[in-house]
Image: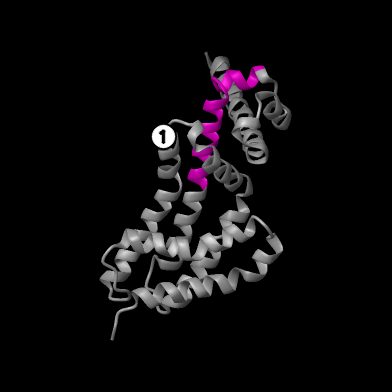
Amino acid sequence: MGADLTAQKVVEPRVARKRRSILAGALTVFGRVGYLSASIEMIAAEAGASTRTIYNHFENKEQLFITVLMESSTRVAVTREALIERHLGGPVEDLEAALVALAKEWVRPSQDFDDHFRIVRRLRGEADRFPPEVVRSWQEAGPHRARRALAARMATLAERGAIAVADPELAAQQFMALVTDTTISRAEFSATALESEIDRIARAGVHTFLHGYLPRR
């Protein structure tokens, strides 16, 4: 009995490592060529696994894609929740500086999670190929989760009188659009231009945001 338990403990981490390897390979392949062009054979080669091993873990390519998308979306959302807590979680003495710092770090996951955001861009172009619930699940796991966390902090700032916000969800959505949409769209064309403009875009976005939401004295 003891030997069986020991063997099980050895096998389970090995299975988990293989699963992680498959997911990492799939993330790279789906980001590189998209869902439609990706094949299990390509993913197996990237992951250093056999196609049979992949099918032992996942029923088909669609299930593998959905798993990759959900797990990577959750990682990005958790990263952004931590940023929100770091910059807005406690007393905020200089709101503009805190929001600029948050804005600059907010776009970092777009660089740190390159493969994920490549998949997201492709997903938007291939959304009609998936059931609506898949797209909704991705939005809930990633963008909407991060937005809700930011909205909660916007509500707290409003309660403290730091900003005048009637709809924290809308304020969070507008903040995200101001500081990320321009940055990410430029990143698709020139990473070096992105690096040189992050500070300027963040400051301009925060300035516009506060112009609309600072209390009128």
Three-letter amino acid code of the residue under disc 1: Pro
User: Which residue appears at 40% of the width and 75% of the height?
Assistant: 210
Q: How is the image coloured?
A: one colour
User: Which residue appears at 67% of the width and 40% of the height?
Assistant: 32
Residue 118 sits inside the magenta stretch: no
Residue 197 location in percent, x, y?
63, 70
Q: Nearer the viewer, residue 101 or 33?
A: 33
Q: Which residue is mark 1?
A: 132
Toward which corner of the image does residue 55 lie, by quadrant?
Answer: top right
Q: Main secondary structure of the magenta part?
A: helix
Which residues are drawn in magenta?
52-75
From the viewer's perspective, is 84 left or right of 198? left
Whether residue 103 can be seen here? yes
- At mark 1, the secondary structure is helix
Asked if residue 1 is positioned above or below residue 188 in the image, the reply reads above
Residue 56 sits inside the magenta stretch: yes
Asked if residue 196 is positioned above or below residue 133 in the image, the reply reads below
User: Which residue appears at 52% of the width and 43% of the height?
Assistant: 124
Q: Find the residue positioned furthest to the top.
A: 1
Asked if residue 134 is positioned above or below residue 141 in the image, the reply reads above
Residue 25 location in percent, x, y?
66, 34
Q: Find the residue positioned furthest to the bottom.
A: 217
Dot 1 alpha-carbon crowd within 10 angstroms: few under 14, some 14 to 19, many 20 or more: few
Q: How many marks?
A: 1
Toward which corner of the image does residue 148 lie, by quadrant?
Answer: bottom left
Toward which corner of the image does residue 44 lie, by quadrant?
Answer: top right
Q: Nearer the viewer, residue 6 or 25?
A: 25
Residue 112 location in percent, x, y?
62, 53
Quadrant where the C terminus lies? Answer: bottom left
Whether residue 106 can be seen here? no
Asked if residue 53 is positioned above or below residue 95 in the image, the reply reads above
